[in-house]
Amino acid sequence: MSERQGPRRQHYLNATWGLKSWLLTKDHKRIAILYLLGITVFFFIGGLFAVLIRLELATPAGDMVQPDTYNRLFTMHGVMMIFFFLIPSIPAVLGNFLIPLMIGAKDLAFPKLNLASWYIYMLGGSFALWAMFNGGVDTGWTFYTPFSTTFSNSYVIATALGIFILGFSSILTGLNFVVTIHRMRAPGLTWFRLPLFVWAQYATSLIQILGTPVLAVTILLVAAERLLHIGIFDPALGGDPVLFQHLFWFYSHPAVYIMVLPSMGVISELITAFARKRIFGYQFVAFASIAIAVLGFLVWGHHMFVSSQSVYAGVVFSFLSMFVAVPSAVKVFNWTATLYQGSISWDTPMLYALGFIGLFTIGGLTGVMLSTLGIDIHVHDTYFVVAHFHYIMVGGAIMGYLGGLHFWWPKITGRLYPVFWSKLSALMIFVGFNLTFFPQFLLGYMGMPRRYHAYPEEFQVLNVMSSAGATILGVGYLIPMIYFVWSMRYGERASSNPWGAVGLEWETTSPPPSHNFLEPPTVDHEAYDYVRRAQEQRVA
Amino acid sequence: MNQGKGFWESLPLFPERASTLASEVDTLYFFTVAVAIFFSLLVAALVLYFAVRYRRRHPNEVGQPEKTITWLEITWSVIPFLILMVMFVWGAKVFFIAFRPPSNAVEYYVVGKQWMWKFQHPQGKREINDLHVPVGQPIKLTMTSEDVIHSFFVPAFRIKADVLPGRYTTAWFEATKAGAYHIFCAEYCGTEHSRMGGTIHVMEPRDYEAWLEQDAPTDERLLSGEELFAKYVCNTCHYPDSSARAPILYGIFGEQAELADGSRVLVDENYLRESILNPTAKIVAGYQALMPTYQGQVGEEELIQLIAYIKGLEPAGGGEQTASGGSTAQETAP
Ligand SMILES: [Cu+2]
Ligand SMILES: [Cu+2]
């Protein structure tokens, strides 16, 4: 391969220098890195809260922090992790970096809007951080009324405003992606030749565009009641508290798919690249993403089975929730079948992908248990739910995010990271994760409610296991932080295609030039066509 | 500790089973756990087997070409879907049991507030954070909150229902085993959320009777519903025997009330609550909006007393109730 390797080659990282060249950049790759910095900060802040929570829960008595402090800890943990880390994570970092590369475009459709989205994200984050430093918020990330509108004495408005602002960044990013995917594909790159990551991002963008405005409206209504005492949700003012739950979950259930769909997209890329095989059932996997996005809007009531919602509404929502499980199951089966007769390497990103399949399967199956009405009565609002959504959001979304970061890191930075440490930390994350969250299923069935600062003694053994697991998990997350930073200076230089993967992003140099491709690419074949590539190589 | 525990109860992974619902929920749970374990193991085994069996042996090796096998895709969509439908139907069945109290259930009242539970027995006895109940008697809880949303949760009974301000929600159980069990508040409700708990003391009926006889000396007595009815001068308009000024309240509970706009509405706890707090919301046919609002004057517990009193008013003549609606009381009045 004729590549202009070497330190003097121009690429997007060294094309221009100085802080201003970054803060005013319109290059989607640099904006991805700006996001990477932002979300990493929020991830570690959210993680710090998790550490304090697990420390407090190591003993039954609420003896480490005050109850009000504890309530702020779990609220801020949820708010930071969900709104400021998970929702932007894969779309804003990997999506931003990869979508133009994968479709053979120079940039996103609206580069300035893309930069603006980052500033909006940072502005929203600043509000939330300001609220946090002033004493935080104690409503839970779910902001249930009338507690949040009438009773809480914490910084509800500031935090909610932060989320409100952040929402616009999410909407604009979604819009940018949709237009880009429609308009800027390379010649010959038809919809069914797109990498599945692009399909997943497309489905996610639809949710971001359609769901987020509902969240924005809900937040405004909460603010109106809290500031102006207009009766919307508080019965004492003539409102309906359950109305809030409907509005909130109408966004927040689909939001789960904003977190996990992109991750599923990443997994499709990893499985194919490390099995060197075309994905099994391409069209089924692609349409499963769309089906999940659409069905995801119809199931919000499964968070409200015991909320006083009508029994019949409960039945309908349970029924519809069962439907969403099918496309998710289809994806898992297709990934598994892709491994059959593949050529499977055990590189670090693949370890994350295989881990994802296991954890996501457990997360999905326990989700189905939760949609089963008779079980939900008992486990709703217990640690069973906490365990379930961590399997989806940490075991699913974060595993996908880290797997993707390890896969594309050589492309992003032009450097390789140490193999041993990366495999070790992947293993630690997998083991630590299961030790942290599996006991929580048992705790939940035993009846330990979530958001408890103190608990009866019979729950201690499982809580200690969970806290011990969290320690391993925490170290597992710190190690990549260290070697990623280390690799930027000392890591071995990466070739343009270190994994031997197919896909347009691997055809340009690592790191790519500012305009992505030296010559605009054209496409005349399916995605993941490893057989064709092997034939070409043999000919050459 | 209990002697003669069954196999499942001796495992430390399940809460005690102390209600008729508990075994229904557990059986369903075991079924879904079995399904979950089966599919998790299936996927894990296949992934591991393929990952080892087809591991890469030469750096340039690639996988076999792939074709889409439609029948396989359909199979693994349809089979999970069918299993999901079994779970759905079964789950809905248990859910209906859990939310439909049997007709012979005795009514207890629950008021949640930051951060305590207040209970009232049908005999008028009241408790805070402790609730004594007899074994073998279906008990219906009618619940409301004085402030934010709480959730009444008894793991040993497998019941949970949110407790909302401004309306009544219900739950029911029939305890099967004497003992003391946790009550938790499951919906986050502020500072002392994790301490908003209590204990349900399930007693043999005889012990319960004896317990009821004891006085609760610390508890200052609440006026009875009848006394409140007089205190708030309800009886100046609502006569037992004349509908001249206001509808007769005897025998209206559980019937349809006919409203001024021609619609009909079921007289249940939430309707009575609204009639007292916000009387103009629904006007009974044939009357003027004369009744004053009691919003802000009558507390949650007094409200419950009043409602319980109205519910207990037998229709004139006693015995069978006629099914002809809110106006029944007028027609059957002597
Ligand atoms: Cu949901
Ligand atoms: Cu509570």
Image (cartoon, rainbow, N blue to C red):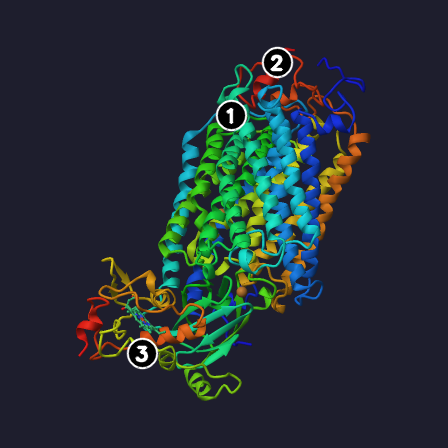
Q: Quadrant of the N terminus of chain A?
A: top right
The mark found on residue A520 in the picture is 2
Give percent across and percent down for residue B332. Answer: 18, 75
Quadrant in the picture for residue A409? top right
Q: Which residue is mark 3?
A: B235
Chain letter of the residue beneath label 1 in the structure image: B
| Vertical side of A90 occupied by A510: above or below | above
Chain letter of the residue beneath label 3 in the structure image: B
Q: Are marks 1 and 3 in contact (CB under 8 Å)?
A: no
Give percent across and percent down for residue A152. Answer: 58, 59
The kind of residue tagged 3 is: Asn
Q: Secondary structure at mark 3?
A: helix
The kind of residue tagged 2 is: Pro
Q: Which residue is mark 1?
A: B66
The kind of residue tagged 1 is: Glu
Q: Mark 2, residues whose alpha carbon is within 10 Å: few (<14), some, or many (≥20)?
A: few
Compared across the picture, whether B174 is left or right of A213 comes to: left
- Per the model, the C-alpha gap separating discs 1 and 3 is 83 Å
Q: Mark 3, residues whose alpha carbon is within 10 Å: few (<14), some, or many (≥20)?
A: some
Residue drawn where x is 40% and y is 65% of the image: B168
Q: Quadrant of the C terminus of chain A?
A: top right
Q: Is residue B41 visible?
A: no
| Vertical side of B293 occupied by A470: above or below | above
Chain letter of the residue beneath label 2 in the structure image: A
Q: Secondary structure at mark 2?
A: loop
